[in-house]
Image (spheres, rainbow, N blue to C red):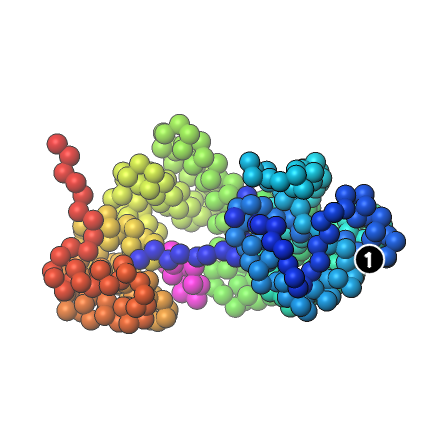
Amino acid sequence: MRILIQLAICIPLIANAQQNNGIKFEESLSWDQVKEKAKAQNKYIFVDCYTTWCGPCKMMDKKVYSNDTVGNYMNNKYISIKIQMDTSARDNEHVKKWHTIANFLRQQTKIPAYPAYLFFSPNGDMVHKDIGYKSPSNFVDLASIATDPNKQYYTLIENYRSGKMDFSEMPYLISMATALMDNELVSVIAQDYIDNYLLNLEEDTLYTKKNILFISNYINSSKAKYFALFSRESERIDAVMAKKGYSQKIVDQVIKNEEIIPVLTVASQTGEEPNWNKVYKIIQKNFSTEYAERNILTGKELWYKYNAEKYDKNWSEYIKYAIQKVEKYGTDTTDFWQDNYLNDIAWFGIFLHGNDIKQIGTGIKWMKNVIQRNPNQPGFKDTYANLLYKAGHTREAISLEEEVVKQDPQNAEFRTTLQKMQRGEPTWTIPEVKH
């Protein structure tokens, strides 16, 4: 079964509900008047940026802004306003008056998601920003951070650009920029931190798990001078990270981004399969035969998966290359997302679109190990049960699917699957015969 992951923020439905408790939002003042009031009372300004379609924005109104503790803190330290960042036919006159300010803030702050929170100093300077649903306690923490010059996002950016930031402060700013999806800023500061600080450390200081992990997270080019660490010092890095193949995984990701993704992008536009021999020779020349073989398999798997999912063709090729890659190179058995990757191949490929008994057997072998590592994931267990059923192991499949239903009794799909198994009906889609 497909595993669904839900996010807690809305990325590009809020009513102006009257609130008796909690934050007192100003509704009668203009933007200039808000700034004047904040300056006169020496208070910061909080701007709640919402849209009409954002569910978490409504939850902030219902569960956070109405909270007494939140209200007491904010009303004491802030002048608060709400600004609708989108437009609709239902906008009232108050909302319409703020359209110009909303458009200005949207352009200046590059808000990546809603709800968004903007904080201004008593002088009207923007000092901090954040996004996403917050609990009452987390929101109060956020509002507190927004008044601390040592933690304010825009203040730290200004410090960095003016050369006033110490290297020790950079990781904190990078983490904030990452959370706010400011990828361009993240790239600039991370490269600066790596090139001008980390790579100047003594080797014994450089080769720590924390430093290697940081470099791994921001490596983006084979031309970067620190890229060579992962090929030249691969054994040492693997030892530091306590994971064999760690360096290889990083190099593979860079090769994928530089050599595989670009040709797949062109191929998806032209409809013509990439010239894999040409790509192979480039990777072999720049890296090694081993890297070329492994990454070409990745490329073929991605190409046929794309065609299978978009055009419902090439399922057999996708299954073949996916199995080849996993069987030859394995997966990281300590990584949940690698198990999720195996589940996707087993479910969407082998189970729903494969009939080769050997391939089904391979899927069964994978999923047996996956559910041992993830006993509390009924979706993985459902995939395993369906593969067993398709292979003719009916009793074992039914017994396993009964466990799945007990684990997640509210899931109608699991109950239907069990009923089909008990009746001896196929649980997979039967392809229509085209005449």
Q: x%, y% of residue 408?
A: 32, 68
Q: Is residue 207 visible?
A: no
Identify the residue at image location x=18%, y=51%. 356
- Are there few (<14), some (14-19), or many (20+) residues within 10 Å of tag 1? many
407 with respect to 18 (left or right): left
Q: Which one is nearer the viewer's eye here, 420 or 341?
A: 420
Taking the spot 50% from the left edge, 55% from the top edge, the residue there is 7
Determine if the magenta segment contains residue 185.
no
Quadrant where the C terminus lies? top left
Q: Which residues are magenta?
A: 330-341
Give the labeled residue for mark 1: 43
Name the kind of residue labelled 1 in the image.
Answer: Lys
Quadrant in the picture for the N terminus:
bottom left
Q: Residue furthest right?
A: 40
Look at 43% across and 36% down and name the residue there.
264
Q: Which residue is farthest top?
A: 270
